[in-house]
Amino acid sequence: VVTNKDLGDKVIGSDGVTVIKTDNEMDAKAQGYDSKTKYLILADLSSHEMCIYKGRKGAWRRFKGEWEFTSGAPATHTPEGIFTLVWPQKNDYGWKNFKLSRACYVYWTSGGFMIHSILFSLYGGLDPDYVSVVDGRLGMNLSQSCLRLDKDDAKFIHENIPTQTTLVVYK
């Protein structure tokens, strides 16, 4: 078995696995994970950055990303670990009502928390392009453990990423 061999844009590691070379820490981290779909999502709780990859273990290419997100507040922190996307909310625009607001493009994870949009008013209709923002802050720790994204980023995941996709949440 050939190991530790440089192949230009790839390298055969000490374990004999060929992986894509990268200078980006998140891109390098992605190479060690597997997913049941052709997509992989990484969410870094330290930088509040999310990226979506396309490919397979050892050959992930960044597909979308460097998206800023908000994670759980200290009392309701977002758990770290390896999860899967389980179920996209299926009502109009994927709405989920909370106590004082609501989020659109909600996707449930196996960790019991959701990926969804920033928070909107409970009043004003269902179309997220025509409702008032209640809390649009990103890059902070203030959710109830969910990962909040800009509306368009949450919409992309909701409409394009299949269930059983691996989600890696880490610091």
Image (cartoon, rainbow, N blue to C red):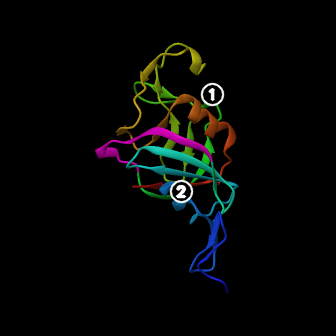
Asked where in the image residue 153 lies, by quadrant, the reply is top right
- The residue closer to the viewer here, 6 or 144, is 6
For the residues labelled 1 and 2, the Cα–Cα distance comes to: 23 Å
Chain part drawn in magenta: 63-78
Residue 76 got which mark? Answer: none
**Which is the main secondary structure of the residues drawn in magenta?**
strand
Location of residue 62 with respect to 99 vertically, above or below = below
Q: Which residue is mark 1?
A: 93
Q: Residues within 10 Å of mark 1 (few under 14, many from 20)?
A: some
- The residue closer to the viewer here, 152 or 163, is 152
Could one spot residue 15 in this view of the protein?
A: yes
Q: Which residue is mark 2?
A: 83
Q: Label 2 amino acid?
A: Phe
| Relative to 94, 24 lies left or right | left
Q: Label 1 amino acid?
A: Tyr
Q: Secondary structure at mark 1?
A: helix
The location of residue 97, given as percent across then percent down, is: 49, 29
